[in-house]
Image (cartoon, helix red, strand yellow):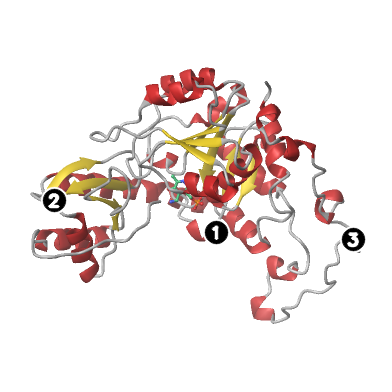
Amino acid sequence: MNVAGLARPDIVAMTPYCSARSEASADGILLNANESPWPLIEDPQARSDEVDSLNRYPEPQHAELRRRLADLYGLPINHVLLSRGSDDGIDLLVRVFCRAGVDTVLDTPPGFGMYRVAAQLQGAGITDVPRNAETLDLDRNGILQALQGQTPPRIVFLTSPANPTGDLVDPDFLTELLKTASGRALVVVDEAYAEFTAARSFAAMVPDYSHLVVLRTLSKAFASAGLRCGAVLAQPDVIGLLMRAIPPYPLATPVLSLALRLFDSDVRKRQRLLVRRIMRNKSALTKRLNGRPFVRRVWAGEANFILLRVDDAGALVQHCAGLGITIRGFPSAVMLDNCVRISVGSSEEMARLDAALEAFQPGNSTATAGNRNG
Ligand code: PMP
């Protein structure tokens, strides 16, 4: 079965919407998209190219940004779909490949919560292959077995580095998984935190596997969560299927122009510097956490956060909150009892956190933490 055979037959059969801007060039006199002929803002202070062109729809898949991201991830431009962050990519994949009430996605809890939320929204099922309750390692055999069953999941979601455990997908395991999944399922590797590890990105494998998808984002190591800009990396067949479901103009003009600015050489230089700074702060934080008496276990991982198990996570979350520091608890997530996730911040923020942890007296507080997972 080729990869289109894994997609929803009704999506494959449908006539895709064709927007005015994708149908014709944006040059000359434009009377084809029911736009205003004038921009609204005339204030000379506020004017810029992007403000001047706000009366026009943006390019649906901005060629220049697509090329920049393709170069960044080492792939041809037709292997890149611009999305509104990776959350958007996850949603598109589930909507295009999973039939409501029929297909499932494979999830490996505890992990990033959006894969199952996207499945639930689509009416798809969830095939859970839980991690090891003690070590939180992936159950690789369980994943392979689920794929070999009578009704394999349509999408396998893996995260490398994973959230919140920080572990990487082993390349040999991924190769084996891709072999097993061939003709049965799409394998999606969410690399939202890839820039924080020295490990090679799986993007390089995308040209070799028609059923491999890699998700990247500008939200984390590119310090641009507010932009809502990411990329789905896959072979053109998959990209073409996702294009059927993506809204006609997903990225707004100001977002596109700000995203392009991230590729200026001075911004790229600062971007690399900030990642190095985070990693320095992370190793200092890891050392200090390992020495704290109330810390039971540390998963330092490969991303810009650390997961720990402590004696009383609720009390720690509440203690930090009282000092104006928000860390993440997981009171209702499977296997993450008494775990907290701490994102690595600036040196000043880490010094404040350190003082808060120093002052923490376990057993003095009753508390409940937030109820989210992602
Ligand atoms: N994947 C993972 C593993 C994440 O942790 C997150 C955000 N927490 C996302 C995807 C979503 O990122 P984006 O901002 O690109 O939508």
Residue holding disc 2: 311
Q: Is residue 176 left or right of residue 69?
A: left
Query: Which amino acid, by three-letter code, is at mark 1?
Result: Leu
The spot of residue 226 in percent (x, y) is: 51, 61
Callouts 3 and 2 close, C-beta under 8 Å: no
**Viewer-proximal residue, 237 or 198?**
237
Question: Which of disc 3 and disc 1 is earlier in sequence?
Answer: 3
Callouts 2 and 1 close, C-beta under 8 Å: no
Residue 262: mark in rendering: none
The spot of residue 52 in percent (x, y) is: 74, 70
Q: Residue most toward the bottom?
A: 43
Residue holding disc 1: 227
Label 3 near ligand 1 (CB < 8 Å): no
Question: Which of disc 2 and disc 3 is earlier in sequence?
Answer: 3
Gap in Å between the C-alphas at discs 2 and 1? 38 Å
Kind of element beneath mark 2: loop
Kind of element beneath mark 3: loop
114 vs 38: above or below: above
Residue holding disc 3: 32
Identify the residue shown where x is 61% and y is 60%: 255
Kind of element beneath mark 1: helix
Query: Which amino acid, by three-letter code, is at mark 3?
Result: Asn
Q: Is residue 356 left or right of residue 237?
A: left
